[in-house]
Image (cartoon, helix red, strand yellow):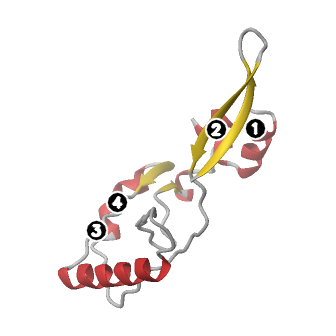
Amino acid sequence: MEERVTQYKDKDGNVRTKTKKVRVNTHKATLMFRFTDWVDRSPPPSALHYIDLFLLSRVYTFKYIYLSSKARSNYSRQKAAFIKQHWTDKQYDFKFTKEIPHHAEHCLSWNPERGAKPWFANCCAMIFLDLIFFGWIQRY
């Protein structure tokens, strides 16, 4: 923790000082969880048969990551070893993020057999609208 002094003017115009303790991060470390086996339990692509009916479809995919008992104990061992190696002070944060490589949660599916792309699905239109601050129209 570090004390920071800031100066400000009150409503009467007098200069006041305020002391505040702030947290200063002095160290950051990351580690990828190592595993050897995994199982994808996604539904088969045939479950998305309705996409053929539309010109454009928004597709949102959820990701659920469950660890088996063996994987959970392996994760706990890796986590403990990592914290022991990088524990540099009394206060530390640990965050576990679940990322799947090349997985996009939101995507837009276009069926060329149904017709041409609409104007709002054009990359050039998006850039133009962003330049004139109307990009929200396309995103809506």
Q: Residue at x 24, y 82 (%)?
A: 73
Residue 129 is tagged as 1
Mark 3 and mark 2 lie on one chain; the one further toward the N terminus is: 3
Compared to residue 33, the image places residue 53 above or below, namely above
> For mark 4, what is the residue?
49
Mark 1 and mark 2 lie on one chain; the one further toward the N terminus is: 1
Cα distance, mark 3 to mark 2?
Answer: 31 Å
Q: Which amino acid, mark 3?
A: Pro
Residue 134 appearing in the image: no
User: Of helix, strand and loop, which one carries label 3?
Assistant: loop
- Dot 2 crowding, Cα within 10 Å, few <14, some 14–19, many 20+: some
> For mark 2, what is the residue?
138
Cα distance, mark 3 to mark 1?
Answer: 37 Å
Q: Residue at x 52, y 52 (%)?
A: 114
Viewer-nearest of labels 2 and 4? 2
User: Of helix, strand and loop, which one carries label 1?
Assistant: helix
Q: Which amino acid, mark 4?
A: His
Cα distance, mark 1 to mark 4?
Answer: 33 Å
Mark 2 and mark 4 lie on one chain; the one further toward the N terminus is: 4
Q: Which amino acid, mark 1?
A: Leu
Viewer-nearest of labels 4 and 3? 3
Residue 43 is tagged as 3
Q: In the image, 79: left or right of 1?
A: left
- Dot 3 crowding, Cα within 10 Å, few <14, some 14–19, many 20+: few
Residue 28 location in percent, x, y?
57, 70
Mark 3 and mark 1 lie on one chain; the one further toward the N terminus is: 3
